[in-house]
Image: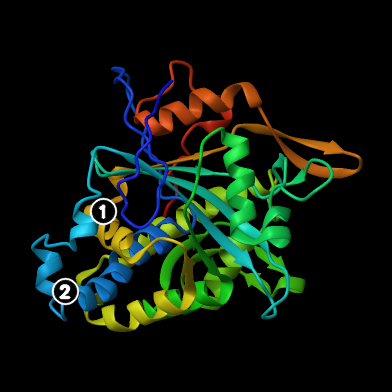
């Protein structure tokens, strides 16, 4: 299928995708995926505010009225733009870091929808610079975000040229800037080696406890259940971030995002995407997980992708339509028990 190629971003030639012919199928909605409201809502909304503020000569009203820099306005079109979202586990500055969270966001600029694909960090995959198949998160330790973009592009069969990355300290700072998040902790979470010690019940989590909630892996399905809990948390974070009472926190939030996030998106791209998706809500977001199965290989636990199910899933993420036969492992995650 020809998804199209475009080079209208201005600074560099990039990949994008035109929407294939629509199929009249029913789409299922799901909660927001991990880091999406941090890396989409906060970066592409709050982040673009501070960048756009400088570009517009100190006038926030210019962005509110839709006035964009020429290079950003010129890139607007009916395209689906893939961006890799990474949450990185880096304990000490300068040390190699593995990607703890890997998500591909398909930004549909025509429909103003975001379709998300979570890739378990234990996914069995090709990694650039490695002699054999291994866990996909190793790609970041070897070659940084560029290596992970290469590995994910190979896995999905598409070209991904942009990433947005945050680390755990940045995550905690963003949560604390918002004043914490209220969520139902549905089970005892205890793993002292990682500082995780949460009790069941509805509670207001600060940045440290929120990080413990999204990192805990002591579930029957391991990383898959962990992804579901991350999706629940970030929907709650999104609801908190969009409360009117938090408007006065925007300057601090912008500083937190600026310090916490690394990206190769250009200023004009961030401004355009922030302007396009600034009013996005949970009904315009769909979250999926890469279809696969847990498997032991040479004594190591992996998430082995169902390769035959990947092409139709990717096609549906680009088109915005359900595949004719939805892969079982890729179905949207339930939002039951959100708060």
**The C terminus - image quarter:** bottom left
Residue drawn at (91%, 40%) of the image:
298
Residue 95 locus on image (x, y percent): 73, 75
- The residue nearer to you, when weighing 282 against 61, is 61
User: Which element is circle 1 on?
Assistant: helix
Task: From the image, tell me which residue sits under label 2.
Answer: 56
Which image quadrant for residue 199?
bottom right
Q: Nearer the viewer, mark 1 or mark 2?
A: 2
- Relative to 157, is 332 on the left or the right? left
| Residue topped by disc 1 | 277
Residue drawn at the location 27% of the way across and 60% of the way down: 274
| Label 1 – label 2 distance at C-alpha | 19 Å
Residue 31's place in the image compared with 41, above or below, is above
* First reached walking from the N terminus: tag 1 or tag 2: 2
Q: Secondary structure at mark 2?
A: loop
x then y, percent, for residue 205: 48, 73
Give the vertical position of 312 relative to 178 (above or below).
above
Report the residue at 64% width, 59% height from top: 99
**In the displayed structure, does residue 89 sit left or right of residue 176?**
right
Query: Which quadrant of the figure has residue 138?
Result: bottom right
Q: Residue at (84%, 45%) from the top-left corner? A: 131
Which residue occupies the extreme right position in the image?
A: 298
For mark 2, does the 10 Å Cα neighbourhood hold few (<14), some (14 to 19), or many (20 or more) residues? some
């Amino acid at each position: 299928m020809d998804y199209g190629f475009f080079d209208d971003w201005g600074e560099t030639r990039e990949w994008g995708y035109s929407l294939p012919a629509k199929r009249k199928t029913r789409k299922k909605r799901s909660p927001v995926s991990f880091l999406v409201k941090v890396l989409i809502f906060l970066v592409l909304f709050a982040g673009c505010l501070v960048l756009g503020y400088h570009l517009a000569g100190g006038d926030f009203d210019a962005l509110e009225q839709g006035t964009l820099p020429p290079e950003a306005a010129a890139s607007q079109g009916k395209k689906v733009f893939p961006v890799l979202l990474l949450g990185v586990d880096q304990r000490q500055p300068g040390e190699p870091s593995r990607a703890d969270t890997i998500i591909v966001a398909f930004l549909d600029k025509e429909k103003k929808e975001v379709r998300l694909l979570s890739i378990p960090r234990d996914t069995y995959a090709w990694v650039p610079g490695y002699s054999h198949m291994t866990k996909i998160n190793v790609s970041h330790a070897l070659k940084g975000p560029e290596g992970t973009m290469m590995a994910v592009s190979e896995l999905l069969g598409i070209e991904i040229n942009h990433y947005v990355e945050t680390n755990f300290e940045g995550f905690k700072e963003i949560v604390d800037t918002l004043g914490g998040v209220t969520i139902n902790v549905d089970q005892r979470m205890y793993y002292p080696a990682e500082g995780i010690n949460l009790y069941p019940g509805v509670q207001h989590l600060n940045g440290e406890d929120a990080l413990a909630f999204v990192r805990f892996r002591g579930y029957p399905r391991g990383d898959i259940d962990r992804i579901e809990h991350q999706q629940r948390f970030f929907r709650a974070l999104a609801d908190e971030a969009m409360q009117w009472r938090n408007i006065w926190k925007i300057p601090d939030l912008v500083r937190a995002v600026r310090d916490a996030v690394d990206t190769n998106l250009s200023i004009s791209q961030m401004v355009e995407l922030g302007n396009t998706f600034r009013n996005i809500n949970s009904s315009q977001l769909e979250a999926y997980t890469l279809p696969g199965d847990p498997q032991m290989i040479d004594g190591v636990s992996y998430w082995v992708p169902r390769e035959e199910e990947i092409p139709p899933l990717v096609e549906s993420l680009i088109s915005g339509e359900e595949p004719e036969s939805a892969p079982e492992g890729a179905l949207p995650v339930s939002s039951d028990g959100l708060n």
